[in-house]
Amino acid sequence: MSVSKLCILGCGGFIGSYILDRVLADPVYTVCGVDVSSYKIQRHLDNPSFVYVNMDISDVTRLRPLVEGCDVVVSLAALCNPSLYNTAPLRVIENNFNQPLAIASMCAEMKKRLVHFSTCEVYGRTVESYVERNINGIPAAFNEDTTPYVLGPIHAQRWTYSCAKQLSERMIYAYGYEKGLEYTIVRPFNFIGPGMDYIPGIDGEGIPRVIACFMDSLMAGKPLKLVDGGHNMRTFTYIDDAVDAIMAIINCPEKTKGMIFNIGNPQNETTIAGLAAKMRDIYESIRPQAPLCDIVPVTAEEFYGKGYEDSDRRIPDISKARELLGWTPHVSLDDALVKTITGFANNYFL
Ligand code: NAD
Ligand code: UGA
């Protein structure tokens, strides 16, 4: 079956805008895109293959005909910014569980395929970080089908998002099991690129994800802040690699039916302290006239408030995506950061 009519929920966000770039460059696709903001996708609004609908996905009555008219629903809409998990937990649960529930139910009823975006945060922390030893040789890399999920206690509200996303996965799995929903679940591992999030005070308010926080500091000559010393680790994935995998998933309904895919780059691991140092070096090479910023530690409570806990380390096992999609990420961390930092500087500054 060839996929041509897409309904993309959350098309105006970071990942959505890059998916639009890719699909609207190919005349085979037509797209109905839903979001509450079109700020990042102005370049596509006049494209005859694209219909943008400015609405909240909770408006199920308006959503129904849009889902009815497509082959596949790509569900990206979410509140996925860690600064909200412990400060707006009810909105986070509503947005990351209740709304996906309504969408999955609609897709099951209308027999539409659903490509749902979950997160690597469902894995939580490493088992080792709690028990400080490797139980029964559980491997370091997170596997979609064998790794257990390790979250903190209820008052550590950081985990509201992880938990809501995990329950959404279980709900979608159950719709597949009981109602025959055709679905694929994507677990992104820290995708990065130009245009992610916002710069506080310029085109958004609050605390964005780490790349935008560090870009804000670098462009304004302010200190880069390392939460709890920046010892925690992430594997960063360049957005073009990620979109290659997403397109393979969208276009291979049979191979990916009922499956969960980690999409990430296990080679691109760094501590957050290492990330700050690299970003500062790259920014200095791009803008040698800019003042050198300090890198300072800050406690999690000072930075995010009470109830913030962190994932210590998350490395994706991507053997399933390699085998079934023939996908492999190519962009190194250094190259990804050069592209990202240059893109930010061009967008906001130069
Ligand atoms: P983003 O915040 O840039 O985009 C989300 C978009 O959804 C925004 O444009 C927002 O306006 C829209 N949206 C949110 N709630 C809505 C609603 N109720 N109605 C209509 N639109 C709504 O986020 P992103 O980085 O593009 O992430 C997209 C998806 O991928 C999310 O589900 C997120 O949880 C998941 N994800 C992303 C990453 C990553 O590395 N970027 C990692 C893990 C998971
Ligand atoms: C992100 C978000 O939960 C989601 O966007 C997504 O589902 C998932 O993880 C992902 O991108 O794969 P996290 O990686 O913690 O969570 O998000 P960031 O805000 O980018 O933080 C990364 C690390 O940098 C954390 O350890 C955070 O404490 C740290 N940080 C952040 C700093 O040290 N300084 C800052 O200024 C900002």
Image: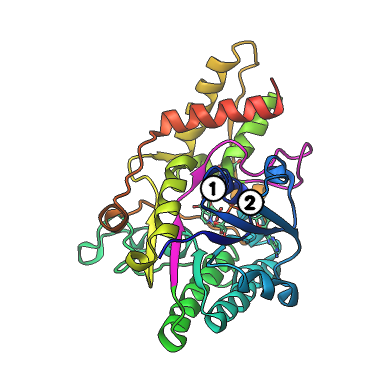
- Residue that badge 2 annotates: 49
Region of the chain picked out in magenta, as a range: 183-208
Please state which of residues 270 and 119 is positioned toward the viewer in this rendering.
Answer: 119
Residue 131: x %, y % from top left: 34, 63
Which one is earlier in the sequence, the residue at label 2 or at label 1? 1
Tell me which residue sits at (27%, 55%) in the image: 319
Circle 1 packing at 10 Å, graded few (<14), some (14-19), many (20+), is few
Q: Residue type at mark 2: give it.
A: Ser
Left or right of 18, for residue 347: right
Residue 207: x %, y % from top left: 68, 46
Left or right of 118, for residue 144: left
Q: Residue type at mark 1: give it.
A: Pro
Q: Is residue 339 above or below residue 328?
A: above
Quadrant in which the N terminus appears: bottom left
Circles 2 and 1: CB atoms closer than 8 Å: yes
Disc 2 to disc 1, how far (Cα)? 8 Å
Quadrant in which the C terminus appears: top right
